[in-house]
Amino acid sequence: MALGSKEETTIEPKKGKSKPPVARVKVGFVEAAVWLNEGEKGEYNSITFKKNYKKGENWKETNAFMPNDLEDLIRTAEKALELTRPLKVEKE
């Protein structure tokens, strides 16, 4: 984990008709959202990644990562993968 990186995991409750991510994982400034999707063959998970950064006084986000972000990106991906396993079992 990159120096000073902080880890956070959040499981999102289901709300209304909109479909928020079922879970979020954050390591440092890198964040993953775990989504539950439905297709012809049933439900499946997908995962999106973003990085938060500050430009001037404003916080922004991007899906581009610098080499020094990769350690946090890897940890975030590992944590997101761990979260998808119980989500699959829970549905069966």
Image (spheres, rainbow, N blue to C red):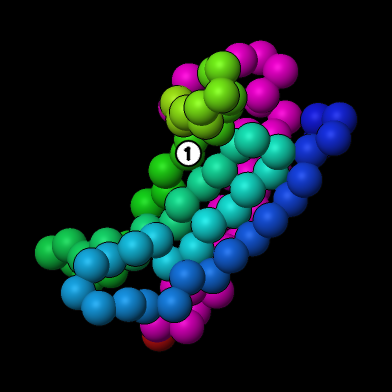
Q: Return the residue at label 1.
A: 49
Left or right: residue 46 compared with residue 83 = left
Most common secondary structure along the magenta stretch: helix
Was residue 76 drawn as part of the magenta stretch in this picture? yes
Image quarter of residue 37: bottom left
Residue 68 rendering spot, x and y as whole percentages: 71, 18
Residue 92 visible to an observer of this rendering: yes
Residue 84 visible to an observer of this rendering: no
Give me the residue at 81% from left, 30% from top.
Answer: 2
Along the line of sight, which residue is nearer the eye, 37 or 88? Answer: 37
Residue 75 rendering spot, x and y as whole percentages: 69, 42
Position above or below: 1 against 18:
above
Give me the residue at 48% from left, 35% from top.
Answer: 50
Along the line of sight, which residue is nearer the eye, 18 or 90? Answer: 18
Most extreme residue toward the front, as rendered?
Answer: 57
Image quarter of residue 51: top right
Was residue 39 drawn as part of the magenta stretch in this picture? no
Image quarter of residue 4: top right
Give me the residue at 39% from left, 61% from top.
Answer: 21
Q: What is the quadrant of the C terminus in the image? A: bottom left
Which residues make up the magenta segment?
63-91
Left or right: residue 75 compared with residue 25 = right
Give me the residue at 37% from left, 52% from top.
Answer: 46
How many numbered discs, if any? Answer: 1
Judge the density around disc 1: few (<14), some (14-19), many (≥20) Cα neighbours within 10 Å. many
Position above or below: 30 against 58:
below
Most extreme residue toward the right, as rendered?
Answer: 3
Query: Label 1 amino acid?
Result: Phe
